[in-house]
Image (cartoon, rainbow, N blue to C red):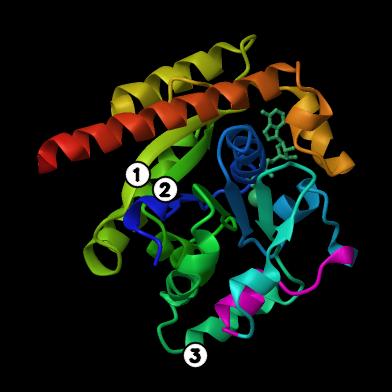
Amino acid sequence: MPGPDRTPRRIALANQKGGVGKTTTAINLATALATRKRVLVIDLDPQGNASTGLGLPRAGRGDGSYALLVGERPLAELMLPTKVPNLFLLPADNDLAGAEIELVGMENRERRLRQALDAAAETLAKFDFILIDCPPSLGLLTLNALVAVQSVMIPLQTEFFALEGVSQITRTIERVKRVLNPTISLDGIVLTMFDRRNNLSELVANDVRAFFRDKVFETVIPRNIRVSEAPSHGLPVLLYDMKSTGAQAYIKLAAELLRRERAAAKAAGAQQA
Ligand code: ADP
Ligand code: MG
């Protein structure tokens, strides 16, 4: 039996707003983490952008996260290696679009992903991180992710309405914590598509930090053309252009995440002693 130290850290990338950098962060944070850790990306968005961005175009996709959710097939049969060593993918299959509706009538509809991952403990024992890329809504797919994880990361685009949208997802996390997953926590907020030449970016970043304080990652992801080009080549930006500001920012973000995880583990250990 794998001990608790061999349980991978489960993190959801969630925000009901589309186009804020969830998928980009899932792909590139996972790639950066994979230089030191073993990582699984779960694509839970019917659009399948994380799968495409990791080199698996729609045409090449067979069963994936839908088959896992409905209990058709176990995780071990569904996950695939990627071009990045130590990085595996559970792709979005073409049936996933129907899952949002089909799940409504199913038993334990909010807990299916959690149960499937718990059932795959042995397969997952070789991983350190699971990053789940959520769709841009707060429907049953995102809910399944929030119930399955210990931690939620919210990518936030540094633009004028950033803070207004974020209250919806933070309230959902609170509700999930009360009713479905008492150990979930928000750690943290990642500012994305930051534009140094635009004062507004700076103002929004300051506002978000004033409100969420140390929940906000110090590392900020800049707006960078290489980041947006990489998916069309089926590559993470770290493989497409390692020297780009975007790739470097994701390397920093991964290092910061690992630092935070170590600090949290240490604090938890001290509390137990
Ligand atoms: P979401 O998954 O939240 O819908 P995406 O990660 O798909 O958002 O990002 C939306 C769009 O913005 C994509 O076209 C992506 O390539 C682009 N993008 C994301 N992050 C950056 C960045 N740092 N610089 C430039 N373009 C970015
Ligand atoms: Mg996406």
- Disc 1 marks a residue whose amino acid type is Leu
Cα–Cα gap, marks 2 and 3: 26 Å
Cα–Cα gap, marks 1 and 3: 29 Å
Q: Position of residue 185 (x, y in %)?
A: 31, 48
Q: Which residue is mark 3?
A: 105
When asked about the image quadrant of residue 242, the answer is top right
Q: Which residue is mark 2?
A: 152
Q: Is residue 248 above or below residue 66?
A: above
Q: Quick one: label 2 or label 1, which is nearer the N terminus?
A: 2
Q: Quick one: label 1 or label 3, which is nearer the N terminus?
A: 3
**Residue at image location 68% in from the left, 56% down from the top:** 89
Of 111 and 79, the residue lying toward us = 79
The range drawn in magenta is: 60-71
Tags 2 and 1 in contact by the CB under 8 Å rule?
yes
Q: Is residue 13 above or below residue 252?
A: below
Cα–Cα gap, marks 2 and 1: 5 Å
**Label 1 Cα neighbours within 10 Å, binned few <14 / some 14-19 / many ≥20:** some
Q: Which residue is mark 1?
A: 186
Of 73 and 59, the residue lying toward us = 73
